[in-house]
Image: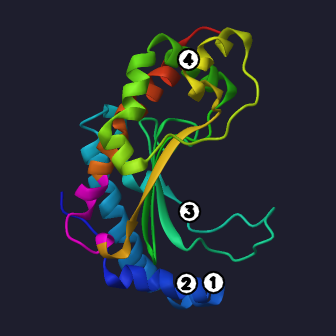
Amino acid sequence: MSAQVSQEFLAFFSSLEENNSKEWFHANKKTYQNTVRPEFIALVESLLEALSTLHAGFSNDPKKALVRINRDIRFSQDKTPYKTHMGAVLTPRGKDMSAPGFYFEIGASGAALYGGLYQPTPVAVTAVRHKIVSESERFKQAIGSSLFIEKFGELRGDEHKRLPKEFQAQSESIPELFKKQFYFFCKFPQSAVLQSLFDETVFQACLAGWELVHFLTEAVETSSSSPE
């Protein structure tokens, strides 16, 4: 692994933060096309190649993993037209935001890695809860390992105030059953982003969260393959 972004990449987004307009973007489009996008694609490609050693589903086209830089402003009070970072969705099911996996982004101030299950369907939440109950020790080990805690701190996510009856008894010893999201994240400073082998640094963070992502992936895959 040997991929990182350049100072020119970060400078582009630093200027975009101050000049978030179509006029500025079009005037600097060559920098985006010739430097920013290719550097990020190379980094994502390296990450997908490494992640594919964990799950074959990760071996997809890096360009298809990219999130559009154009913002959807239809229902937002913020009418700035562009995101001030490059982002990519990395899951065993391609760019599927409802699937367990990772989301990675880089902007002017640094980078961030998110992992887990951020936008699960109600069916997926139920499947994850069943798997947590049936494999509670494995789940607790995934979120309680020294690597996970050192890198991400804790499992995050919004919670339901009430649980279905089938999970209420187990929730006393497994409070994470209340969650309706199951995610974690860490950030990387600008200095780390500019270092060689930054892709390896990000991959090591992915490894710290992989046991949980793998656990969630199994749960969701089981629910999706179950008969209606």
Secondary structure of residue under mark 2: helix
Tell me the amino acid under the disc marked 4: Ser
Q: In the image, is residue 69 above or below residue 50?
A: below
Q: Amino acid at mark 1?
A: Asn
- Distance from Cα at disc 2 to Cα at disc 4: 42 Å
Query: CA gap, disc 1 to disc 3?
Result: 15 Å
Q: Is residue 59 visible?
A: no
**Whether residue 172 can be seen here:** yes
Of the numbered discs in the image, which one, if any, rests on residue 223?
Answer: 4
What residue sits right under mark 1 in the picture?
20
Element type at marker 3? loop
Check disc 2 and give the amino acid type: Leu
Relative side of 25 to 168, left or right: left
Image side of residue 24 versus residue 198, left or right: right
The residue closer to the viewer here, 218 or 190, is: 190
Report the predominant secondary structure element of the magenta stretch: helix
Q: Which residues, given as a range, are shown in magenta?
A: 192-202
Q: Residue 56 in the image: x percent, y percent?
A: 31, 32
Q: CA distance from mark 2 to mark 3?
A: 15 Å
Whether pointer 2 and pointer 3 mark residues with C-beta atoms closer than 8 Å, the reply is no
Compare marks 4 and 3 and give the one earlier in the sequence: 3
Q: Of callouts 1 and 3, which one flags the residue occurring earlier in the amino acid sequence?
A: 1
In the rendered image, which quarter is residue 41 located in? bottom left
Which sits earlier in the primary sequence, circle 2 or circle 4?
A: 2
